[in-house]
Amino acid sequence: MPAKRPPIPLSRERIIDAALEIADSQGLRRLTMRRLGDALQVEAMAIYHHLPGGKEALLDALAQHVTTVEVDPSGAGSWQELAAAWCRAGRAALLAHPGVLSLAMTKPPKGSAAATIREQTQQLGDAGLADPAGAVRALRAYVFGSVAVELQQTGWADPKTQPVEPDPDGDTAFEQGLSALIAGLAQA
Amino acid sequence: MPAKRPPIPLSRERIIDAALEIADSQGLRRLTMRRLGDALQVEAMAIYHHLPGGKEALLDALAQHVTTVEVDPSGAGSWQELAAAWCRAGRAALLAHPGVLSLAMTKPPKGSAAATIREQTQQLGDAGLADPAGAVRALRAYVFGSVAVELQQTGWADPKTQPVEPDPDGDTAFEQGLSALIAGLAQA
DNA sequence: ACCTGAACACCGTTCAAGT
DNA sequence: ACCTGAACACCGTTCAAGT
């Protein structure tokens, strides 16, 4: 008979991971401090010790987690390729955690999420784009929106249990719209 | 002293209007069956009589309300103008009720919302666009996303009380990205 | 037919208390 | 320092009961 395993100490990171798993598999509505405590083998109240802001801070952290992305600009030959790389990375991060998309789109970007936007703007400016701030705004809008539409279309509704299979239709639709938008930005 | 005014009978429409007002002014998190009942001068339980699906049905109805739009195609000379008209109408409907944007983007379109998509696709096909379904998907994505980004930028966060003032920056950013996308669709 | 009151299982969060 | 137990105000929803 195995001994009772010593409890892994709670941490901000473990809390966020467990919360993402619950939101993705059961929907944001079922992400509850008490359920989160259960998943972490701990009373719900213990969470407050590691996340002082309570549930609101947890939701902020989840939004930040799926909107923080890095792209290495050295691989891209033109601002068009660079913009496309940022968009693909952003889409992948959002699709990885469909349960918290609504938070990602709703919460104003803070911390690492805001840093992501600044870096993207900087890189596109360096790559020679005339209005990088406007472009980043348009590209972000497209990424958010296309992921939302894709999840609507694949039938991932909030409380369902469907894992997100990579959707070839979603891929090509995304790439087509993306080329269209980038082509349009080049003419502006 | 005025007499106690006779209670206006409850109706699905009054319920939805009151719910939108609460969500817009106080945030979706504070939209509660009990608070909704208070706003309607009625016990919360009375609502179930008019909205059999309970709160889930209410949220569906709210999403439907802000994603249902009509556009008269006779005013547009080209599919480009027609597409722009649909996008502006869609954006206006979403901006009118910022509190339920996350529902609009998350819930799969049903009923009149689905009908809106079908009609838009039909009209753009009639106007000569080659792949109307793909175009509508890209345009919807852009509208959803740009409204989300605009609301993030104007600082409308879920629980705040800010009314949505028309944002000239949002207007021009929207129009610029929109022209870019439509121009790109023309080349596809 | 339409609304209410009481009840149930469940929330988020506090606070004092344990170790 | 880190976690627990009990408590409080508040949820969504049911069901029998009122009118």
Image (cartoon, coloured by chain):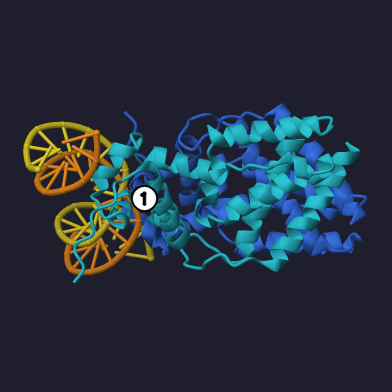
Chain colours: A blue, B cyan, C orange, D yellow
Output the chain of dot 1: A
Label count reads 1
Q: Residues within 10 Å of mark 1 (few under 14, many from 20)?
A: some
Left or right placement of residue A167 versus residue D7 in this view: right
Type of the residue with mark 1 = Met
The residue nearer to you, when weighing A173 against A37, is: A173
| Quadrant the N terminus of chain B occupies | bottom left
Residue B25 position, x and y percent, is 45, 62
Residue B154 falls in which quadrant of the image?
bottom right
Residue at coordinates 26% horizontally, 55% vertically from top-left? Answer: B41
Residue A68 seen from this side: no
Vertical placement of residue B99 versus A168, above or below: below
The residue nearer to you, when weighing A148 against B19, is: B19
| Quadrant the C terminus of chain B occupies | top right
Residue B177 position, x and y percent, is 78, 54
The residue nearer to you, when weighing A148 against A86, is: A148
Residue at numbered disc 1: A33
Residue B173 falls in which quadrant of the image?
bottom right
Residue at coordinates 82% horizontally, 62% vertically from top-left? Answer: A132
Left or right placement of residue B35 versus residue A185 in this view: left
The residue nearer to you, when weighing A74 against B180, is: B180
